[in-house]
Image (cartoon, rainbow, N blue to C red):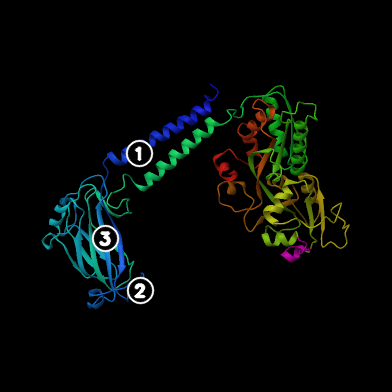
Amino acid sequence: MEWLSAENVVAVGTAVLGIVASGVMVWYERRVPRRKRIGYRVQMDNPIGDDVRSGRANRRLGLFDEAPGMTDATLVLLRIENDGSQSIADNDYTGRELHGLTAVFTDRTIRGVSVTQPSGTDHLMDHFTPAAGLGYEGNTLRIPRVPLNRGDHFKLLVLLSGGDVGCEIRLSGGIRDGEVHPNRSATPDEKPPLFSRAARMITIMLTLSVLTLAGIVVSGDGTPPPIGCAHGTLTVTGSTAFAPVLKEVAQKYQQDCEGATVVVDAHGSTAGIRDLAAAGKASKDGKDGKDGTGSPSLIALSDGPKPGDMPELRENRIAVSVFALVVNDDVPLKNLSTRDVRRLYRGEITDWRQLGGPDLAVRMVSRDANSGTRQVFQRRVLGRGEIANSSVDCVHKDDRTAPVIRCELDSTDQVLSTVAELPGAIGYSELNAADRAPGLHHVNLDADPPSVDAIEHGTSAYPYREIEYAYTYGRPPADSLASSFLTYLSRGNGQDVIRTYGHIPCWTPEGMKLCA
């Protein structure tokens, strides 16, 4: 059967294992003995008098209004229960005093106490006597050593004066092999939870997750990306920043897979996406000599997502690329604020001395409009486009009205070599290429360095970075060279190459979080 693949078997097995684990957790919570526990919670804390500083306004008649000491009175209903899995006997209370538990009502004075218990537990009332330790003084209530079967509870209605509604109420005492702790309300009120809140949440989330996983995998199209080789010719275009990775991965793939030819022709992210869209349309219309049913043997890499008006392009997230602003070594600045960078690229800074640097004119060496590196810079750092081009050779100002010299070049290598040659020049590049280039250095942004390690481990907010996407026209056939190469690039040996060139692969645990 086609659905009985290794991946589907693993997914279904995981779902079954999750359900079994959930059942075991329920059984453990209900059947396996745990520590003895007494839980308590405040079910009511209401004002009676006018002078209570917290709580809603109230109306009173009779004794509530006439009796002395009622102007700042409050009523508290305290529920105490055995919410563990074992019964508690009177000798399980470990205190040296006659009583077993102590309740303290901070900043309030106890005026009276009434004890209530649910039906069927009348025997508990025999323990609430002064001889058994029941009593109060000031803000402290002494509670006897009341034996409680599993699920038993009683309530204390306490009349208090002084203090505010909501003042802290603490219950303390020692239980052999157990604890006294605050808990939450159960639903319905008279029944304790079958198992803990944390266990319920874990069980529900685990069960839903594994069932969803099994459903998606089994109901999918049954064509997981191949991990084997394919034959033919494939062209990879797009990002020049990612081109070194693509060239090495293409070379390794051809070595591992005889009969495959992978051509890397990178000339910019935007141009690559346009070429892919045009090739896909031609293939669909049958204008390329084919029957119009196949996806073209072309992959476009882009620094960032495609335009929103190309739904036919299918994305594959490959890596996180880190970019850097670079300046000529004659400019010794090591850090720039995002605000100053934006001023630079609006033409408001014309000389480096305005930023505390040397007396050198600013020269901006930028990429052409097809560049994904430029688009990431504008989107992630500037928040807008760059000013107009004013120079062809990056040396002479062709537009005399322009505030600074700004030129545009076709590739990352051209930008780096030009910045290194021109005093006062600033540009941008993929980080690994910038680190290898002589005559220039990269700058921090808002004191955050362009560090792959810091970004991967979540310790840096460095903004000049972007997901690297690989686009195909529709879903390529499972046995096609395009599908095989994408798998090799993203999940196979290509991951090592991606990391070697200073990018973070999306299919590593850290990369999955960044690429999500």
Q: Is mark 3 on a helix, strand or loop?
A: strand
Q: Is mark 2 on a helix, strand or loop?
A: loop
Eye-nearest disc, 1 or 3:
3
Eye-nearest disc, 1 or 2:
2
**The residue positioned farthest toward the front in the image shown:** 61
Type of residue at label 2?
Answer: Arg
Task: Please state, as top left, top right, bottom left or bottom right, where the C terminus lies in the image.
Answer: top right
- Dominant SS of magenta comes to loop
In the image, is 203 to the left or to the right of 329? left
Q: Residue 12 placed where, x, y %?
A: 47, 30
Q: Do the residues labelled 1 and 2 touch (CB within 8 Å)?
A: no
Type of residue at label 1?
Answer: Met
CA separation in Å, label 2 and label 3: 21 Å
Pick whichever of labels 1 and 3 is earlier in the sequence: 1
**The residue positioned farthest toward the left in the image shown:** 131
Depth check: give the residue in front, 332 or 460. 460
Depth check: give the residue in front, 55 or 324. 55
Residue marked by disc 1? 25
Q: Residue 321 placed where, x, y %?
A: 66, 45
Question: What label sits on residue 17 in the rendered view?
Answer: none
In reply to whether residue 347 is colored magenta, the answer given is yes
| Numbered marks: total | 3
Q: Magenta stretch: give its range.
A: 346-358
Depth check: give the residue in front, 444 or 342. 342
CA separation in Å, label 1 and label 3: 31 Å
Q: Is mark 1 on a helix, strand or loop?
A: helix
Residue marked by disc 3? 78
Q: Do the residues labelled 1 and 3 touch (CB within 8 Å)?
A: no
Residue marked by disc 2? 53
Pick whichever of labels 2 and 3 is earlier in the sequence: 2
Quadrant of res 344 = bottom right
Whether residue 64 is situated above or below residue 252 in the rendered picture: below
